[in-house]
Image: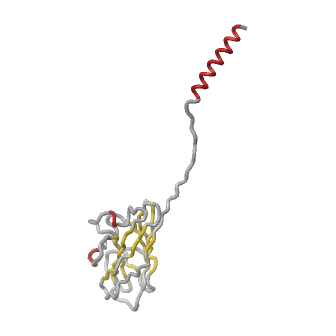
């Protein structure tokens, strides 16, 4: 009987000590979903090139305002999504042919641009694919990142200008409309 009392006493002491050690910490689990708002707003400013002679280039009279109105860090892609009926898009730096035009885009803080500010290597807006803006694409390389079409923080504004390279010749006369879509992506 004495042995049984000693064993019970020993187990009670060991159990008490073990319980005291286990109460020193504990964990809990939780879940969270982060919603990132990727969004862009482009002003409805009427961009015009005026009258451009065949084989010549014209720069838009102003730039449209592109705003990151979401909550994510955005970069922008451009694509021609609407063209005048009967015209095709020249997507290389080569010559512009009959009933063909080229459009170039540029994010910049400049307020007065000339055709030579645009690069046929980096600034051509395609109709077959979205092209991503970066330090050189749709940009004046010497300008800082704060005016270019990438790393755009929430509420950041950028100015987007265009150059139009007119067809070699065309039978289509009168005012024509070109649509460019600006896509916002999270970086």
Q: Quadrant of the N terminus?
A: top right
Which quarter of the figure has residue 181?
bottom left
Quadrant where the C terminus sits is: bottom left
Figure check: 147 above or below 170: above
Residue that lies at the very extreme toward the top in this rendered image? 2
At a point 34% along the width and 89% down the height, the residue shown is 169
Q: Quadrant of residue 51?
A: bottom left
Q: Where residue 164 appears, x then y in whole percent?
A: 34, 81
In the image, 23 versus 64, the foreground residue is 23
Taking the view exactly as shown, the residue that stands out farthest to the right is: 1
Q: Residue at x 31, y 82 (%)?
A: 58
Counting every numbered tag in the picture gives 0
List x then y, in percent, for residue 172: 40, 90
Q: Position of residue 20 (x, y in %)?
A: 59, 25
Q: Nearer the viewer, residue 122 or 187?
A: 187
Along the viewing direction, whichever of 20 and 80 lies nearer the viewer: 20
Instruction: Tell me where residue 88 appears, x and y as whole percent.
Output: 41, 81
Query: By what rule are the colours in the image chosen?
Result: secondary structure
* Residue 160 figure quarter: bottom left
Is residue 80 found left or right of 135 in the rendered image? right
Measured along the vertical axis of the image, is residue 27 above or below residue 72?
A: above
Position above or below: 87 against 161: below
Name the foreground residue: 144 vs 78.
144
Instruction: Write the residue at 42% across / 81% down.
Output: 178
């Amino acid at each position: 009987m004495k042995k049984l009392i000693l064993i019970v006493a020993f187990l009670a002491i060991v159990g008490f000590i073990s319980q005291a050690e286990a109460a020193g910490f504990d964990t809990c689990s939780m879940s969270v979903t982060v919603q990132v708002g990727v969004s862009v707003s482009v002003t409805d400013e009427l961009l015009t090139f005026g009258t451009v002679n065949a084989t010549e280039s014209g720069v838009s009279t102003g730039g449209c305002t592109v705003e990151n109105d979401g909550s994510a860090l955005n970069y922008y892609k451009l694509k021609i999504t609407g063209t005048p009926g009967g015209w095709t898009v020249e997507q290389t730096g080569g010559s512009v042919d009959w009933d063909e035009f080229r459009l170039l885009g540029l994010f910049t803080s400049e307020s007065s641009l000339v055709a030579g500010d645009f690069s046929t290597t980096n600034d051509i807006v395609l109709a077959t694919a979205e092209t991503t803006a970066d330090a050189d694409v749709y940009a004046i390389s010497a300008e800082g990142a704060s005016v270019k079409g990438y790393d755009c923080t929430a509420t950041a504004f950028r100015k987007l200008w265009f150059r139009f390279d007119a067809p070699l010749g065309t039978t289509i006369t009168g005012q024509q409309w070109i649509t460019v879509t600006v896509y916002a992506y999270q970086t």
